[in-house]
Amino acid sequence: MAPPRPPRVRRRLRAGSLARPVNARSYRGTWLLVGIPLLLVAFSVPGLPSLPRLPGYVSGFDADAASATARTIAQRFPDRRPGTRGAARATDYVEQQLETSGYHVSRDTFRADVAGLGRRTLVNLVAEAPGRSRDTIVVIAHRDDSGPGGGLDDNASGTGALLELARGYGARAAAARTPLHTIVFLSTDGGAYGGLGAKRFAERALGHRVILGAIALDAIAGRGPVRIVTASDSPSSPDPTLVGTARDALGAASSRLEVTHASASHQLLDLAFPFSLYEQAPFTARGTPAIALTTAADRPPDTPTGGRPLDEPRLRAVGTAVGRLVATLDETGPTATTTRTYILVGARRIKGWAIQLLLLAAVLPAFVVIVDLFARCRRRGIALAPALRALRLRCAYWIGALLLFELLNAAGAFPHGASRPVSLETSAAQHWPLATLILFGLALAGGWLAVRERLLPHGTVAVEEDVAGHTAALLGLLVVTLLVIALNRYSLVLVLPSLHAWIWLPQLHDRPRWTRIAVFFAGLAGPIWLLHAFSTRLGLGFDTPWYLMELAVVHLVSFPFLLVGACWVAVAAQLAALTTGRYAPVPARRRGSPPTALRRSVGRIAHAGRSASLSRRRALEG
């Protein structure tokens, strides 16, 4: 009987060797410094301030009248898409109701490119209850809907509440009770198509008046809890005073009313990737505190024919709360005229500077490791130039793909529109331009065939070349991180997973391939989180990639961010090649070196052209 084999002991590799080039001790030690920002964050979580409530305030909001108005609008004008006959008739009806309440209504007519509809004429209706001060409080509700279903909740309910609130202030004016500040009741057009009317008013009004606060009413009579929406078109939040007062007003309107807001993770994502389908967003982006009240989710409800009836108790509670909120802002004066940045966690908030400090501190351990890895390569005399050339070639490929996308966009190959969130109910969000995308894909495939020969391995890659490839990619990732910090520090949450996962790939050279692949996919957590959030919060499903591309088409995602994203994809492509064993360094081009696939293809085409020309010449001479 053979003696039993001794257990196989895995030899511990020496730290600092080519098999273990990452300095794990420096990584762990640097994390201790992050504890300082964590302590600062722990001591900077104040509660939401609130304005004093008006003593003896009694709401005159008539929910029955608001509900009857909403049903009238939905039944008489079921199709209120911008530019349609129904939209024009609904505009006349709302204007007539405001004039009946004693207002002089001004029309603001403008033209806009609506994604999925084309260039349309839109109309905002502005009714003012003059106050002793020109400082303004704005109540907003959009009239339009996204189809011929009636839009009973979205947004006939908001329009009905707006008209009822305006009627109450019209009665006060008739009784010679002038408010302290000017109250503007704004009936917007294009609200279901990215808040076009709200953006128009915000751009024109902020030049000549101070807006104390803006409250948007959108789908306020559904069955869900009342949500306070604070997302913006930029990394900013409304003044917490306005949010706290709105919460107090909603709680005072009904003890049974459930009041919520987006979760902390969703608020962080809204700062990293600013986006909102509601009408408070353009105001907050321009420094005006604004919120939206809704009973819908992040995606406003569609407009099916014969939908659920309005929840009148909820409509009454929201209308009463808005009346109380407006009256409180009017009585207390300009205490909430700025925007700040924070994340709400229950009844408390984490300030924006603390979040930024924490994100910047989280970059530091990976930064130290990457710089140390670069220094070790230099000390060992490992050549980084071939690896940097490989990364440069990949960056050129993906930046070229981005430029081709912009060229197709400029040529009108994609659905165009104003730089606003695209309505989820239009063809621009749901119907992929397959012919254009196939053409784009073929162009990318052709470009890859032109560069693949220089990027694919033609032999065994040495350990030094493997380490150099990882180092060059991580240096590129570090540059991408610095560019993200310059553009939007909150967007670091999308980059940090790749920064902290991919620095360990050089350490896993001798590990099974599935381990390396798992670590690589862990670095994709940031973009996957963004895709998952759009897919679930907006109900897009498999349309999510195209919808994000359409946001780039309408330039809601700026070109600098797209450029940084292309560089990040190039880094990910090099690390993916290293992970799967498909990496090769790119040597410098020398005179007499074999031609590339692109040069060979061009040469064949030129040779075929010369041969055909020579054949025709001989035929003519004969």
Image: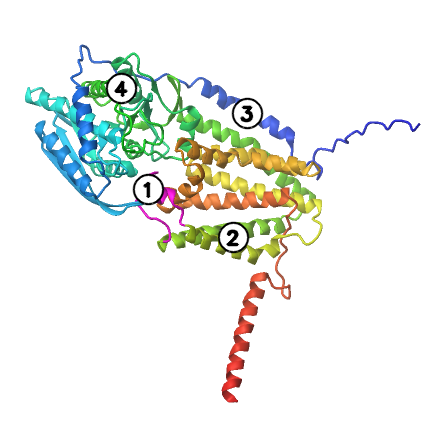
Q: Which residue is mark 2?
A: 397
Q: Which residue is mark 1?
A: 426
In terms of depth relative to the viewer, which is nearer, 380 or 620? 620
Of tags 2 and 4, the one toward the viewer is 4
Q: Which residue is mark 3?
A: 33
The amino acid at mark 2 is Tyr
Q: Is residue 434 left or right of 284 when viewed as pictured?
A: right
The amino acid at mark 4 is Arg
The amino acid at mark 3 is Leu
| Secondary structure that dominates the magenta span | loop
In terms of secondary structure, where does tag 2 sit? helix
Q: Is residue 452 left or right of 327 when viewed as pictured?
A: right
Q: Is residue 565 left or right of 382 when viewed as pictured?
A: left
Q: Residue at x 57, y 42 (%)?
A: 475
In terms of secondary structure, where does tag 3 sit? helix
Identify the image quadrant of residue 550.
top left
